[in-house]
Image: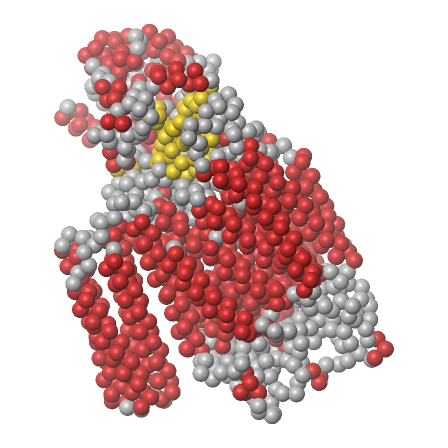
Amino acid sequence: MTVSLVLIVLLMAGFAGWLIGQSIRVRPWVADTGATPPAPQTPPFVTAPRVGLAVFLAVVTSLFALAVSAFLMRRHIGADWQAVPVPALLWWNTGLLIAASVALQLAWRSTRQGRQAALRRRLALGGGLTLAFVIGQALAWQRLEAAGHPPAANPANAFFYLLTALHALHLLGGLVAWGRVLALAGRGISQPRLRQAVELCALYWHFLLLVWGGLFGVLLMS
Amino acid sequence: MAIAIALIVLAGGSVLFYFLSPWHLTPLASNWGAIDVTIAISFWVTGLVFLAVSLFIAVALIRFRHHRCGRAHYRPENKPLEFWLTAATTLGIGALLAPGLVVWGHFVTVPDDAHEVEVVGQQWHWSFRFPGEDGIFGEARNALIDASNPLGLAPGDPAGRDDVLVERPLLMLPEGRPVKVLLRSKDVLHNFKVPPFRAKMDAIPGQVSYFWFTPTRIGDFEAVCAELCGIGHFAMRARVRVVEPARFEAWLAEQPTHAERLACPPGDPRAGEALFATCTACHGERGQGRQTTGAPRLAGLGTDYLVRQLRNFRVGARGTHEQDVQGRQMRPFARSLAGEAAMRDLAAHVATLPMDPSPLTVEGDPRQGRRLYRSCANCHGAGGQGNTRYKAPRLAGMNDWYLVRQLEHFRAGIRGRHPRDPYGNQMVDMAQVLVDEAAVRDVVAYINGLARADAAPAVARQAEE
Amino acid sequence: MHEREYEASPEAPPAETGEMELVHPRTFIGKYIWSQDAKVIAIQYAVTATAIGLVALVLSLLMRLQLGFPNSLSLIDPESYLQYVTMHGMIMVVYLLTAIFLGGFGNYLIPLMCGARDMAFPYLNMLSFWVYLASVLLLVAGFFVGDGSSGAGWTLYPPQAISQGTPGADGGIVLMLVSLAVFIIGFTMGGLNYVVTVLQGRTRGMTLMRLPLTVWGIFMATVMALLAFPALFVAVVMMLLDRLLGTSFFMPEMLGMGEEGSQRGGSPLLFQHLFWFFGHPEVYIVALPAFGIVSDLIATHARKNIFGYRMMVWAIIIIGALSFVVWAHHMYVSGMSPYFGFLFATTTLIVAVPTALKVYNWVLTLWRGDIHLTVPMLFAIGFLFTFVNGGLSGLFLGNVTVDVPLSDTYFVVGHFHMVMAVAPVLVIFGAIYHWYPKITGRMLDATLGKVHFWVTFLGTYAIYYPMHFLGLAGVPRRYYAYGETAFVPDSVQSLNAFITIAALVVAAAQLLFLFNLAWSLFRGREAGPNPWRATTLEWQTPHTPPRHGNFGDELPLVYRWPYDYSVPGVKDDYIPQNVPPQAVEREPAADRGRGGES
């Protein structure tokens, strides 16, 4: 639970810090003088989709932190823990995911430069690489199972499958959003909206790459 | 206005209720008086706060309720007041927490001179183990459990050979000696709770938990399960008897060790055949039961169950209730048997008897019975075949009139109320599910149906043997 | 801060914050079924939650009948009793309370109180409700499959929850776990909306420190739910895998139905940690919105600003944060390392400090107020009394030593029903009486409301207060019958019968409430836009009930906090948040100071 607690403490601390900024020395009962009209509450770059993604990423962080916490806790209980041999294939898959992230980053950049063709190419490449990653993960599962490590054999195996599956599911969910963005790009949608959509996609991919890095590290460690 | 009066009456009444209600902590029987003290402190502190806040609200409601030209006071906050309230609350919380933590310090520190007993929970039964002369428990695992090794002791561990096993849910403890209770579970979560001892803890499969206490009062105490463990949760009982140390030692010496249990020879069916001659007069040549004599079928009953019932008759745990006419008739016969070995021989012979179908005499609605039987199936099996691990006898194929009579006896407490008949106690509780005679007949009608479904394979099995 | 940049413009610009593309459907189905209007979604949530809550209420009555008059109903056997226990708990905690506070009140009030046209992502919001409905249907389907719904207790402790022999082990438990996972997915969709709308959708002038406490409570509860529900999600997924694929996350080496199982090495305690990591914050997910709403009810009906607003906000945040580090107080006797007891008893009792401060501030808000004993106010006072009682009994259970003899007894049942069932439900009732005029345009009947209040308040107290004493006497919970237990005196049976009768009376009073809801919808007195003369933005809408988009052509501009009640020197005893200072009507100088400062 320590991992989750640390993350939640960090999240809460950030939140509280921001809130203190908003509330310290504010005397809420004092009304505006009315000399100047009331101000908007958020600067223009704080758009709803951006805030939404940030909040969603916090939820996903909590999910993975808890899953990893459970994994670490279980590893410390009892001496019967038999770690899974991590298939070498995972290194290749990691490479694919990094490449996908880079492709989406480039796609984001091309929206800012207004290069439609490059955008579509890079988007498609990012999605394709991601799909390859997910297939690669499925292959890794198959190999593990063939090597005599089915999920039901012991808790270590079960955790391996669970963590990789949760991550892959999040990527698949991302691919649904990616499909929509690709369709938008094809239709030549108004620039700001497309830019925003590609941006969100790229950020989500970077985030899942980070998560994968964390998961992979934890799996290698055990 | 009414609300203010209601608050005053409720708050005052609540505090009075604490003093006047007949429901209080059970009289203490262990060293954990300190726990009672922390409870008392909590009651005093919270009671005062409760009264103060409630009365303050009531006064506010009376004094500041709306009237025509009234207007509320305007004051957004009051820093000093808020500070002092925070400080006072923190102090009050500290006053509750500090004694609690001190007592908890004792609770987690087991005294060096504590002796150990292992309590093993299973659905819906308690058994116990003492470490024996070497003072060390042998290793035990759930995977090793079988009929001859009910607690799953590891065969290779020498420390387990002298472990004393108590399968009957009766635990004796010496007065005045601290005891560390180690808890294990064979299946789901359980919690060994004896209210007068105050301390308790969950038993978890796959790990050992513990708590300690010192019994300080001689007497019989009821242990219950305090962690939901399935449909028989409410009927999972044991008895803890606190006795003088000498009596405890004597009792412990009587209990078989693991090694002795393993060495105990199985019953001899041939020797049992001779003994069985006496039984045939009432129970029938082939132990098929006779309604005219009121003696039930024996064929089909497991050795474990038969021996236990014979023992119950011998010690008076069964067949002593004045309304149990047939049981009273059975007692002298059970007492005429020479001893444990004779009972085992007899049961071994009964196990060889053929499983002829019983005549059907009871009419009821088996569809109603099917629903009622859900509660029975957990121990007696979905097919009514019985289950040794739950100490549950076979029901399918037994005399239906006998089942009706016994269920009625359980319902009325004619059978199963005796303190030395723990499984009977359980049946008394479970039989309450059957609310009337019709329900009894319905469930027996359903069991009759199970027997018919069961008959074909049973006959085949007989043929094989 | 960043606001400075935008304050420069000299004339009031059109309030562009929160201007968004709204889907305005024309058809009935588009308006009321597949609606993206947060207010309609709120009502859909509330109706669904109430409907399933009524099912859970009936289940509780069946349990009470068995306890009060044992074995008088042949339909209740030990299996069905445990199924009722499980479904009642699960429905009430998750599918009723969480859904109605966040999905119901959250959806209705957040956009209105923040001065937004709608939630940030209306389509996602609509989806959230339909996913919630699916989860409810999945849960209810459990009643009808195989041997019925799960009987594992709402805490679903393994191994019992998924081992053979437990009621519903075939289908019910699988449906329940799937339903929970679906619920969490649906809730996350809604939760994102509530948080983003509060953070990003506030109108001009609505600073964080001018948000009504209702919004603060719901907001913080949502933040906590978003962080805590993943724990339940992980636990539920792992348990599903244990049940369906035979993995061993939670399943140890054990016997099931007397037979040896195939699973090895799982840890039942791991589940408990995950469950309570969600389960304890869940208590506050229900409590914080109630705290917020009750603050606004008290301030409005006592015509007085909430006392110590800043402390109230910070108390909500601190309670929310602390509730993540107290979970193991549900596990003092679970067999985890007993040394955790020191840590968790301390953190648990620390939570009592901010909670007590909230109580003081509510009480001090009443002091020197101008208390109108309206029906919402009665419910708010009922909440205060019940919550103080339930909160104080929590000090027993949070204090590890005291908890040992009391855990798993009726003391616990009494405590959590007082604090988590009755107290929030009283707030829900109060809130419905308070906002019904805005939602429908008509007042609820006050006489019926008062009868409803008195029966509910006194009745629930009669149910739950004596239960504490049963627990003190050691009576264990989740027992189908007590039979001949040596330490349970016969008088317990009479008390149980009394409690059952009280429960039946309270349940009957709820029918009166339902009748009032239906009757007043058509026959209630016309309410007008602001019947309680309240300050918050939802009462300042141009239409009652508010139309899609909430505020007509222009969003309101906010000049003040939501608690400008009885401001000295002002003619009315309230100033709505959107009234500019120039427009405030002053009293003649002679009268000044009467309500004045001290």
Looking at the image, residue B460 lies above or below residue C517: above
Query: Which quadrant of the view contains residue B326?
Result: top left
Q: x, y (%) of residue C176?
A: 38, 53
Query: Which quadrant of the view contains residue B375?
Result: top left
Nearer to me, C87 or C155: C155
Q: x, y (%) of residue C521?
A: 61, 66
Give the residue furthest to the right.
C590
Give the residue furthest to the bottom.
C10
**Apparent side of residue C89 relative to residue A73 in the rendered image (left or right):** right
Nearer to me, C583 or C446: C583
Q: Is residue C513 visible?
A: no
Q: x, y (%) of residue A84?
A: 21, 54
Query: Which quadrant of the view contains residue C545?
Result: bottom right
Q: Is residue C6 visible?
A: yes
Nearer to me, B220 or B387: B220
Quadrant housing the C terminus of chain B: top left
Nearer to me, B325 or C523: B325
**Apparent side of residue C299 relative to residue C472 in the rendered image (left or right):** right
Q: x, y (%) of residue C534?
A: 67, 71
Quadrant housing the N terminus of chain B: bottom right
Looking at the image, residue C438 lies above or below residue A70: below
Model colouring: secondary structure
Looking at the image, residue C473 lies above or below residue C99: above
Looking at the image, residue A170 lies above or below residue A5: below
Residue at the spot 15% in from the left edge and 59% down from the top edge: A143
Residue at the spot 16% in from the left edge and 65% down from the top edge: A89
Report the number of discs: 0
Residue at the spot 21% in from the left edge and 10% down from the top edge: B271
Residue at the spot 20% in from the left edge and 68% down from the top edge: A93
